Amino acid sequence: MRGLIRKFIVEVLGFEGFEVIDMHWETPTGVGVYPIGVLPFSREARLVVTVGRKWMGRCPGCLGRCRKVYEHLDCRRWEDLPWSGRAVSIAYAPDRLWCPRCKSARVELLPWADPYQRETRRLQQHMALQAASMPTSHVAALYAVDWHTVRRAEQRALERWDATREQPELTMVGIDEKYLGRRNKRRRKFVTIISNLETGEPIWIGAGRGQEPVNDWVRSLTAEQRAGIKLFSMDMSQAYTTAIKSHPELQHAYIVHDPFHVMKRALEALDELRRATFFRAGPQLRALGRGKRWLFLRAWERMTPQDQDELKKLLRCNRQLATAYQVVEELRDVLHAPDEFTMAMGLVHVMKRIERRSNVPMRKLHDSLDEHFDEIVALGRHHPPTGRVEALNNNWETAVRQARGYRNLDFLLLKLRFMTANPVRTDNGVRRFLALGLPTPYAKAA
């Protein structure tokens, strides 16, 4: 009966080339307990399965067989998936083997865990799958571990997923910046995010903003990757444009400005004119315009009939403000023009309506549109999916809320890439993701 139980446990473990030497129960304090009759164990008892190697050990680098044992190491433990709600640990004393191919002594290949890890791969994959939709603290409470353990396991699982998937081709690039918040303790309060516009996935995150981080990313690319880039989408920052145009291997790439940032600058000019109209003209107009900022910034087609009537009453107070609002709505339509010629003609018409110098906020908008005219008109020629750049901000905020902030930007990049690609949206995708935690085929590893 004892042999049948061991054989059953070997089948559940699924570790080829290993056998069960011993198994016992432990309390949370590490004291061993043994069954007495039919009395049930405490739910806090942990099953410890001690395994031993039956076959020749293998090198984790070249996967070759190693006959010579360099050093016998102490027994170590790895946390495994719970069995029927009970915690399980795998105990094994690995050997440091001398590899004749690598000419070095390394700890032998383990089919259940990666080097320097104290959780099995399948446990790491399950933690990462649950952390995709649960806060890190909830996953830690579910497995009765520290949240640092969940974070480390999730990072390793996402690295495994990213290394085994097919990397998408990079032809259209999005550049944007992200504010880390006033409570962030980093010296630089901004980061620059480089993303693939075709898939929406972030490919690089660098500290700071402006020309320097973009130059660092460009230097990290190969000559073939630079030649394959056809388009850059960015905001109206001159630093980003200078960083791309100054590189000799990116002269062939087009630069387009995100319509979101174009409209943001237009709405800032409209808001400045609103403040000058209502809050700097006396107490009566100030009382009339208080609390109505959202009404001016909302698109006309998204308003209810009641909101439209209220906005009309406010626009009657100042003809210059009414004209500015009409221009902003016209600019909104121009940015959705079907072709380059239509967008250019519409943009010229908008600029003619706001070229008067007496209207200072709208004149500044005119000068900005004139300076970036070619990059804005290029939207009508290429029609890139620029909305995916701003969509990363929503994924960023969701990830930060689930884990209460990130200090490791490399891990945050993996998390955002996983959230964007979303490989676990289907049953087949979940099975593929969990399959990355299956034991290594020990017999055929070489």
Image (tube, helix red, strand yellow):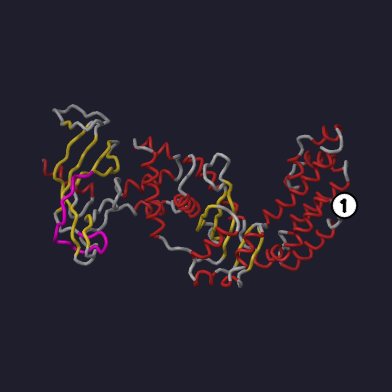
The kind of secondary structure element at disc 1 is loop
Q: Is the magenta stretch mostly helix, strand or loop?
A: loop
In this rendering, is residue 273 above or below 341? above
264 left or right, relative to 187: right
199 left or right, relative to 294: left
Residue 155 at x, y percent in the picture: 40, 49
Residue 34 falls inside the magenta stretch: no
Q: Residues within 10 Å of mark 1 (few under 14, many from 20)?
A: few
Q: Residue furthest front?
A: 187
Q: Name the residue under label 1.
A: 358
- Magenta region: which residues? 58-76
Residue visible at 58% across and 40% down? Answer: 182
Residue 248 at x, y percent in the picture: 58, 72
* Amino acid type of the residue that numbered disc 1 sits on in the rendered structure: Ser
Residue 255, image quadrant: bottom right
Q: Which of 332 and 377 is in front in this view?
A: 377
